[in-house]
Image: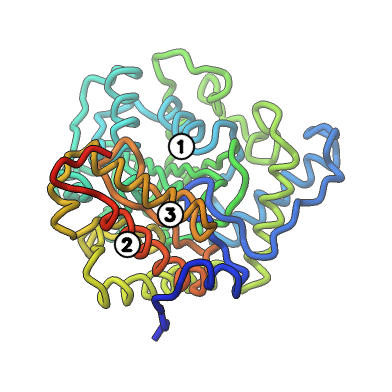
Amino acid sequence: MFDIQRKPSHELNTKHKLNVNFASGPCAKRKGWIPPAQKLLGRSHRSQDGLEKIRQTIQLMKKILQIPDDYLVGIVSGSNTGAMETLLWNLLGERGVDTFSSCNFGKAWTHDVVDELCIKDVRVFTNSFPNLCDTRDVDFNRDLVFCWTSTTSGASFHNADWIKSDRDGLTICDATSAVFCCDIDWTKLDATAFSWQKGIGGEAGLGTIVLSPRAIARLESYQPSWAIPRIFKVASNKKVNFDIFKGCTINTPSMLCIEDFYEALIWTESIGGLQALLKKVEDNYHCVQEWISNQNLFSFLVRESDRAHHIACFDITDVRYKTLSVSEKWSFLKKVVAICDKDGTGHDFLGHIATEPHLRMWIGPTIDVEDIVHFLPCMEQACKKVLDDTKYANCRF
């Protein structure tokens, strides 16, 4: 269907104007991207023009993502990390907490809950890499902290059907690489964080928090016992700072990043909105899926039930690779990436270094099927080259 051919990489690269950036964050810019409007550079974010642009960005984001009208959406500093810390520091402590700790960032949020906020009543759910946690034993009378997608492993929930609608606790979700790529049921999420440098390819440094009426009620009825750093504080003395959700950011944002993300949102609307993004993701995933089924050197890292459709993570099946140590595998994979990087056929598709060795390829909505069709044979050729050039009897890369 997708006509993935084994052609020399230089031939593929010269005949097509391709998007060859496959990092999972910052993600590739959309095709046709140009530097954003710069009329607000040097202007105050609190000026009439600056504030209006921030408000427009919030409103357009809310519209495209189909976030309910009674939810609050605000822009914060520190990317997804700052957004998640904002949620954890302001909302937790009122009751016991369940955390999902099977992925790299899930472990980070668990550390914050247990070791930084020192919440005593915590249940930690985990699973072997790269699989998702089992959701069957979650107690929705407690607060839940989890990642929708594990950016570092390529595992993802495909829906929120497992979350109870009549829960008493809050669901606090790191959705940083899921937003704009997955069909999210916002009614199942009470407090959500995501960054801008994934999904539709915004710039790094800024993030978004989304609060449901239940999360707002928590802020108005409960005050944590710990001091909250000013950069994270969205409520004080049980009073929500609603100005944050009207465009008055806690500290100074980059107006260049604001303009860039706003234009990415405008592009999203121009191609058909959220449904168009989701269709691109599915087209990309099925292209990779078809390629995997027609070769025998690579396999998906993640089992199908847990597999993200916007991040493709690969293992190598060759027995010579399988016999390598962990450090040797990383060295092998770095050589594969270096070959593609040198000839310009693909950049930054090495797996996250804090996980087990693998290759990771962003196939979200800023990537097109033609990019995938022309890159995968190049990755395969590079891998075969490293296999052919290596003496495995005494393999030390």
Q: Which of 39/296 is in front?
A: 296
Q: Nearer the viewer, mark 3 or mark 1?
A: 3
Residue 245, quarter of the rendered image: top right
Residue 47, percent from left and from top: 84, 35
Residue 278 visible in the current orientation: no
x 42%, y 61%: residue = 182
**At 20% from the left edge and 47% from the top edge, which residue is drawn?**
133
In percent of width and height, residue 233 lies at 54, 24
Where residue 331 appears, x then y in whole percent? 31, 41
- Crowding at mark 2 (Cα within 10 Å: few <14, some 14-19, many 20+): some
Q: In the drawing, does residue 301 fall left or right of residue 59? A: left
Label 1 or label 2, whichever lies nearer to me, is: 2
The one nearer the camera, 198 or 141, is: 198
Q: Amino acid at mark 1?
A: Ala
The N terminus - image quarter: bottom left
SS at mark 3 in the image: loop
Residue pointed to by mark 2? 158
Name above or below for residue 226 compared with residue 386.
above
Mark 1 and mark 2: Cα distance apart in space: 28 Å
Q: Earlier in the sequence, mark 2 or mark 3?
A: 2
Decide if residue 66 is on the left or right side of residue 261: left
At x 21%, y 24%, the residue is: 121
Mark 1, secondary structure of its residue: helix
**Residue 363 visible (yes or no):** yes
- The answer for how far apart the CA atoms under marks 2 and 3 are is 10 Å
Q: Which quadrant of the structure image shows residue 204?
A: top right
Q: Which mark is residue 217?
A: 1
Q: CA distance from mark 3 to mark 1?
A: 26 Å
Q: Which residue is mark 3?
A: 178
